[in-house]
Image (tube, helix red, strand yellow):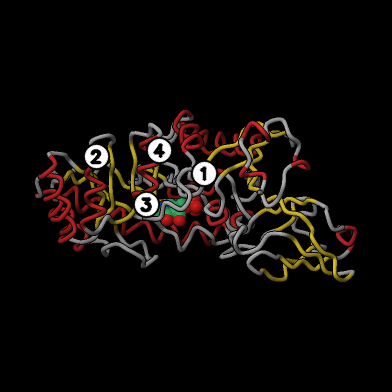
């Protein structure tokens, strides 16, 4: 049994070297600094922070974000929102479309217990939502999702968005609240200047759409977008009201190389792994792999060696990671325990049941990742 499956009381007070691997660690000092840095940024801005909980999937961290001034929480999935509502979070944006009878029924159930806003980009879906809300006697807040150029969900800016906003506003039991506009194709642009120019170009049609809807007499309360790579850009764009950044809480290998972001937030999430084999002088094998490390984006690195060329991640199997080692990393021995900064924090978190949260290497808490796997 791995240590993260042990009862929390078995681990509190333990040092990292005593924790069995693989285990998912939070450096609490680093995470708390990240939470404060982002909260401080928004403290004096017209736009407010509504952090995306898809990164941490943890009610206790969501409550920390709310305590620092976040206006609510963003979720990707209804299942995540259900976990957050059960834990007392009462204002949630599900930044996706809720489609189909079963999910709409669950959404209506949740509306009796919390304020939930959802994204819409289809008139028929809006009518389904309105009918279900009417049957339940509840009101549903919606944001019309508008394409920022990411070309995922969303209607096009301008006339299509205005038309859908009017459909929403005219339906009973639906409250048209504004626009969902996430620029996910721009958040990872490494060069700050290029990122700023592309965000400005992408957001101009969104703000123009807001103005067009308002000219038509519909108040727009919320225009929401932005991620960790763009919070300072989108979050200071006139006409934007909320920012949905999520990854900043932990950072990861991918965001660490994004200009103006990597230096601002600390790496707070690591996977504790053991060197299980040293088959050759330049090869080391870890007991983690695709089932314990999000390998879909970004380049992981060993915390001890930073991003040095002494350690190269050469490949992953389900339960193995192959490292090429040089210089001081050649001293790694079977049994050595290392902290790996994941390339992608969000997909790594979703692989674990619990966080082992430590302060300066001593375990302070074990938190369930309550919304992990809540993909429905
Ligand atoms: C709709 C939406 N908003 C916000 C975010 C936040 O992103 P980040 O992880 O860059 O902070 C994401 C990330 O996938 C997203 O899909």
Task: Give the residue number, with chain letter if any, for mark 2.
Answer: 111
Q: For this rendering, which residue is in front, 344 or 351?
A: 351
Quarter of the picture holding the C terminus: bottom left
- Residue at coordinates 39% horizontally, 39% vertically from top-left? 84
| Front: mark 4 or 1 | 1
Question: Answer yes or no: do the residues labelled 2 and 4 have beta carbons within 8 Å?
Answer: no
Q: Is residue 65 visible?
A: yes
- SS for dot 2: helix
Q: Nearer the viewer, residue 345 or 228?
A: 345
Per the image, the residue denoted by label 3 is 77
Mark 3 and mark 1: Cα distance apart in space: 15 Å
Q: Are marks 4 and 1 in contact (CB under 8 Å)?
A: no
Answer whether labels 1 and 2 touch (C-beta < 8 Å).
Answer: no
Q: Position of residue 268 (x, y in %)?
A: 64, 44
Instruction: Give the mark, 3 or 1, whose residue is nearer the N terminus.
Output: 3
Q: Position of residue 263 (x, y in %)?
A: 65, 47
Q: For the residue labelled by badge 3, is the local secondary structure a helix, a strand or a loop? A: loop
Identified at 59% across, 61% down, the residue is: 291
Residue 369 shows which numbered tag? 1
Mark with earlier residue (3, 2):
3
Q: Which residue is mark 4?
A: 48
Cα distance between the residues tagged 3 and 2: 15 Å
Tell me residue 149's x, y (percent). Answer: 37, 66
């Amino acid at each position: 049994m791995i240590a993260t499956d042990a009862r929390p009381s078995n681990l509190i007070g333990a040092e990292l070297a005593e924790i069995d691997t693989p285990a998912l660690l939070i450096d609490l000092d680093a995470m708390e600094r990240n939470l404060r840095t982002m909260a401080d940024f928004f403290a004096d801005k017209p736009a407010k922070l509504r952090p995306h909980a898809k990164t941490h999937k943890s009610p206790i961290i969501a409550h920390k974000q709310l305590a620092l001034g976040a206006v609510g929480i963003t979720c990707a999935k209804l299942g995540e929102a259900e976990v957050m509502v059960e834990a007392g979070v009462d204002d949630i944006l599900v930044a996706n479309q809720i489609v189909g009878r079963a999910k709409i029924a669950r959404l209506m159930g949740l509306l009796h217990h919390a304020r939930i806003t959802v994204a819409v980009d289809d008139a028929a879906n809006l009518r389904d939502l309105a009918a279900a809300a009417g049957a339940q006697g509840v009101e549903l807040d919606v944001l019309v999702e508008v394409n920022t150029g990411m070309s995922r969900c969303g209607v096009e800016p301008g006339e299509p968005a205005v038309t859908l906003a009017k459909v929403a506003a005219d339906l009973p039991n639906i409250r048209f609240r504004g626009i969902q506009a996430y620029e996910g194709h721009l958040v990872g642009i490494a060069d700050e200047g290029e990122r700023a120019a592309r965000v400005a170009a992408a957001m101009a049609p969104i703000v123009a759409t807001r103005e067009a809807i308002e000219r038509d007499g519909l108040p727009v309360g919320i225009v929401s977008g932005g991620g960790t790579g763009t919070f300072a850009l989108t979050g200071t764009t006139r006409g934007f009201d909320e920012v949905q950044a999520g990854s900043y809480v932990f950072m990861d290998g991918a965001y660490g190389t994004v200009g103006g972001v990597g230096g601002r937030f600390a790496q707070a999430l690591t996977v504790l792994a053991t060197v299980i084999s040293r088959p050759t002088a330049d090869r080391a094998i870890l007991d983690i792999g695709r089932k314990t490390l999000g390998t879909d984006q970004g380049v992981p690195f060993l915390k001890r060696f930073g991003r040095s060329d002494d350690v190269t991640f050469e490949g992953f199997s389900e339960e193995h990671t192959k490292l090429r080692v040089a210089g001081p990393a050649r001293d790694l021995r079977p049994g050595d325990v290392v902290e790996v900064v994941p390339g992608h924090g969000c997909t790594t978190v979703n692989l674990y049941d619990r966080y082992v949260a430590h302060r300066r290497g001593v375990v302070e808490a074990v938190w369930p990742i309550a919304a992990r796997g809540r993909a429905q």
